Each structure stands twice: as C-alpha cells, then as structure tokens.
Image: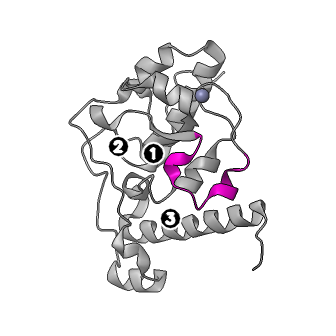
Amino acid sequence: MKTIAPQEARDILLAEECAKARKLQIIFGRWWRYYATPYEFRWTLYFEETLCPYCGAARDPNVIDRSDADVGLWADHLDHMDPLSRGGEDSIRNAVYVCARCNLAKGKRLFVAWLETLAPGLRERAQNIYEAKHGQLPEAFQPGPRQARLIQPRRELQFEESVLRRLFPAPIVTGPPRTMPVTTAFTPTRQSSR
Ligand SMILES: [Zn+2]
C-alpha cells in the first residue's frame, strides 16, 4: 500500500473541501459561507491558521498522520467564536481551530467579551481574524436563541457539479439563514487600519 506524504494527504483533503465549496456556491450563491458547516470543512478550518488565533501557540504539524482518528482526539478544539449557546452560527464564518487551553478558558463567552481578556497584540490579531471571517465587527453580533450544531453531511454534496447546476439553476436563497447585519461583498469594516 502506497504511503501518502503528509503534504500530499493535506492537499487531497483540502481539494475535497474545495470541491464542496464550489457545490455550495451553486446551491447558495454568494451566501454559501453561511450554509457551510464546520463539520464539512474541518481541514480547511484547521489549516486556515498556523497558530492558535487566541494565544499564538503553534499547531501540531502531525495532525494529518492521525486523520483517521476521531476529530475529538485532536489536540486542538473547534471553537465557535460566538458560541452556539448564545446564538452564534454553526458555519465556517464563525469557526476556528484553537488550542484546548484557550477553548476551555473561553467557555461560553461572546467573542467581544473574550477579546477583552487577550493580551493587546493577540487581541488585535484575533479581532482581525473575526472580522475577515464574519465581514463585521465582533460588537455587531446580536446574541440570540441557541443554534444547532450540524454533524450530518449535506446530501446535495454527493452530486456532481454538473448535476447540481441543473438542479439549482439559480441560488435557492437570497440571504443568510437568519436576519443579521450583513456587509456587502464580504468586506470587513475595520475600526482602524494601522
Ligand atoms: Zn491558544
């Protein structure tokens, strides 16, 4: 049996998730990120940052070697920046991989409150990551009812892109799943750009 080098394995996993992203764009148009669950895009999320977004701790480079293990065994935790229990989205817009220590320390705090506890340099970095992913400032988040965590594969994704284009000639949504402030063209609104 051929042994796959970690880099090669990583490229394959990321390519699979890129294909899912293209399919979601057919179904949900420009709003696809709101409908893309962390469950479906965990490798993309894992490799989005090379350091813990909250404390700067380095990522485990051997994680690919354990890719057949349950995700729960990873040293890093998937964090919903605004917690699901406070109405945060279960989407890739609101998810990052962080070290276990930061995830446990953060608990159920809203992102805007969590930022206050970070050291100045790290705080700015974490805030930039939030803004780039959400397209808005952490302060703009409105706490709401608890959101469900989706851990089922989306059935549509098993179809080829060509089939999906026939099934969904136009996006089936005209906005995010629920009413929330949305910026146009996904451009972060920065408080300051030093
Ligand atoms: Zn950390």
Q: Is residue 71 above or below residue 191?
A: below
CA gap, disc 1 to disc 3?
Answer: 13 Å
Q: Is residue 70 magenta?
A: yes
Residue 189, position in %: x, y?
A: 49, 32
Residue 108, position in %: x, y?
A: 36, 26
CA gap, disc 1 to disc 2?
Answer: 8 Å
Q: Amino acid at mark 2?
A: Glu
What residue is disc 3 on?
21
Mark 3 beta carbon near ligand 1 (under 8 Å): no
Residue in view at x 47 percent, y 83 percent: 160
Q: Amino acid at mark 3?
A: Ala
What residue is disc 1 on?
93
Q: Is residue 45 above or below residue 104?
A: below
Q: Name the image quarter holding the C terminus.
A: top right
Q: Is residue 79 left or right of residue 98?
A: left
Q: Which residues are magenta?
A: 61-75
CA gap, disc 2 to disc 3?
Answer: 18 Å
Q: Is residue 181 magenta?
A: no
Residue in view at x 70 percent, y 65 percent: 9
Q: Quadrant of ligand 1?
A: top right
Mark 2 and mark 3 lie on one chain; the one further toward the N terminus is 3
What residue is disc 2 on?
89
